[in-house]
Image (cartoon, rainbow, N blue to C red):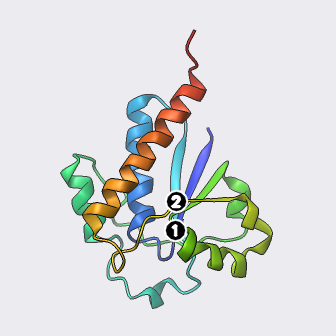
Amino acid sequence: MPRILFLCTGNYYRSRFAETYFNHMAARQGVPWRADSKGLARDLAATGHRGSISQHALAELRARGIPSRDAERSPARVEAADFLRYSRVIALSRCEHEPMVRELFPERLQTVEYMEIGDVYLEAPRRAIARLTRELDAMVEGLRRASYPPP
C-alpha cells in the first residue's frame, strides 16, 4: 500500500491533523493510500508543545466526527531513512519547512512537496484547518481518480 508522510515542525498540530484526516477520508473513499506524520525539529521537546497532540487538532477532528485513534502517540521525529519509506513526503509549510529540509536533509530537498498552512502563531487554527482539509480532500479525490479511472 502506498504511503504519504506529512511533515511539520513538531509533529503536534498540522501534520497530526493531516495524518488523521487523510486516513479517514482515504478509507471512506476507498483510496488505497495511508498517511503517517513526523516532525522536522531535531529536539521535539524544545518546541514547547504540551501533550501528545494539539487541542486545536483534536477539536477540529471531533467537530468533523473523526476519531483520533492515536491521540496518545508522542510526536515523532523524521529520520533520513523515512524519505525512502514513503511514496510522497509533504511538508505543510514551504516558508517554514523548506529551510529545515535544506539544512537537515539536503539530498531530499527536491523530493519534498509543500503546502502552505500557517502554524497557530501565524493563522487561526479554524481557518488553517479549513484550508488544509480542502487541500487534503482534493488530494484524496485525485488519488481516487488515479486508482479508479472512469471507464
Q: Which mark is residue 2?
A: none
**Circle 1 sits on which residue?**
93
Q: Quadrant of the C terminus?
A: top right
Q: Residue 16 falls in which quadrant of the image?
A: bottom left
Image location of residue 119, percent across then percent down: 39, 74
Q: Which mark is residue 115?
A: 2
- Asked whether, in this view, residue 100 is left or right of residue 55, the answer is right
Which residue is pictured at 46% across the width and 40% down the height? Answer: 138
The secondary element bearing badge 1 is classed as loop
Q: Residues within 10 Å of mark 2 (few under 14, many from 20)?
A: some
The secondary element bearing badge 2 is classed as loop
Q: CA distance from mark 1 to mark 2?
A: 5 Å
- Specify whether residue 77 is in view: no
Q: Do the numbered discs 1 and 2 sit on residues whose CB atoms are within 8 Å?
A: yes
Name the one closer to the observer, 116 or 109: 116
Which residue is pictured at 75% across the width and 62% down the height? Answer: 110
Image location of residue 70, percent across then percent down: 37, 58
Q: Amino acid at mark 2?
A: Met
Q: Residues within 10 Å of mark 1 (few under 14, many from 20)?
A: some
* Residue farthest along the top direction in this orientation: 151
Q: How many marks?
A: 2
Which residue is pictured at 28% across the width and 70% down the height? Answer: 124
Image location of residue 13, percent across then percent down: 38, 69
Q: Residue 68 falls in which quadrant of the image?
A: bottom left
Q: Residue 104 falls in which quadrant of the image?
A: bottom right
- Asked whether, in this view, residue 134 is left or right of residue 6, the answer is left
Image location of residue 58, percent across then percent down: 26, 62
